[in-house]
Image (cartoon, rainbow, N blue to C red):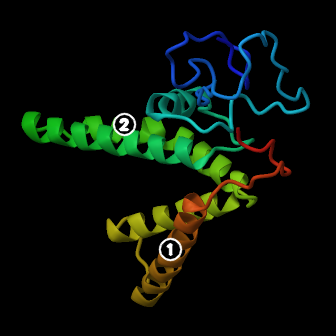
Amino acid sequence: MKCIHCGAESSDHEKYCISCGAEMDISDVPSEVEDYPEPAASYEDGESPVYTNFSGAIRLFFKNYFNFTGRSTRSEYWYAVLFTLITAFALAIIEVIIGGWMLLLIWRLLIFIPRLAMEFRRLHDVGKKGTLCIILEVLLLILNAADDDYMSYDDDIILFLAIVGIILSIIMLSYCCSPSDPRDNEYGRAPH
């Protein structure tokens, strides 16, 4: 059967499209329909945004490694977050067993850019600018540097930055939990 979203061929028993990760819904599609319309050609945002499953989200996470444009749905975002957390937890356990420290550091460096790109796309999906991610990351870097005594800061400044960081984190979390904008917006087409 063909996916109605991307036109890729999938077997009849697949619940999700193997190409774009969209859910296959054959209940309302007549069996004699062979040609499905192509997605709008005016959008060049890759395979996002699609409602996807766990494996589709991981694939999109790495496929859109440097993609800071377009949109990412809640399912794509949260499944990818779950994957990164599970992997980090597994690597932390391995480090405890073997007594190392490099695996988790390498993992964090490996996923920094795609995680930031995915956060940008997630904010775009709810109609917000992705600059909140940059502000939050810079703030976290300053707080980490102050915590590790790389830099000397006044305690009042650190407290202020920590409070601002908590507020920005709550705002970011609320945006990441928000449903997708159901209409096309300036960042791309509506999710399918």
Residue situated furthest bottom in the rendering: 156
Element at badge 1? helix
Give neighbour class at mark 1: few <14, some 14-19, many 20+ (Cα, 10 Å).
some
Task: Tell me the kind of residue under disc 2.
Answer: Trp
Relative to 87, residue 41 above or below: above
Location of mark 1 (residue): 165
Relative to 16, residue 108 above or below: below
Q: Which residue is at a point 57% across and 49% down the rendered structure image?
A: 74
Residue situated furthest right in the rendering: 42
Q: Position of residue 10 (x, y in %)?
A: 59, 12
Marks 2 and 1: in contact by CB < 8 Å? no
Q: Which residue occupies the foreground of this view, 156 or 76?
A: 76
Which mark, residue 148? none
Judge left or right: residue 5 versus residue 107.
right
Q: Quadrant of residue 148?
A: bottom left
Q: Which residue is at a point 81% across and 43% down the rendered structure image?
A: 188
Location of mark 2 (residue): 107
Q: Position of residue 111 (x, y in %)?
A: 46, 38
Q: Which residue is at a point 84% across and 21% down the rendered structure image?
A: 38
Q: Quadrant of residue 20?
A: top right
Q: Which residue occupies the foreground of this view, 47 or 134?
A: 47
Relative to 116, residue 12 above or below: above
Label 1 and label 2: CA atoms lie apart by: 24 Å
Quarter containing the C terminus: top right
Q: Position of residue 48 (x, y in %)?
A: 68, 35
Q: Which residue is at a point 59% across and 21% down the rendered structure image?
A: 17
Q: Position of residue 130 (x, y in %)?
A: 69, 56
Q: Which residue occupies the foreground of this view, 142 or 192?
A: 192
Element at badge 2? helix
Task: Tell me the kind of residue under disc 1.
Answer: Gly
Judge left or right: residue 76 versus residue 109.
right
Q: Which residue occupies the foreground of this view, 12 or 180?
A: 12
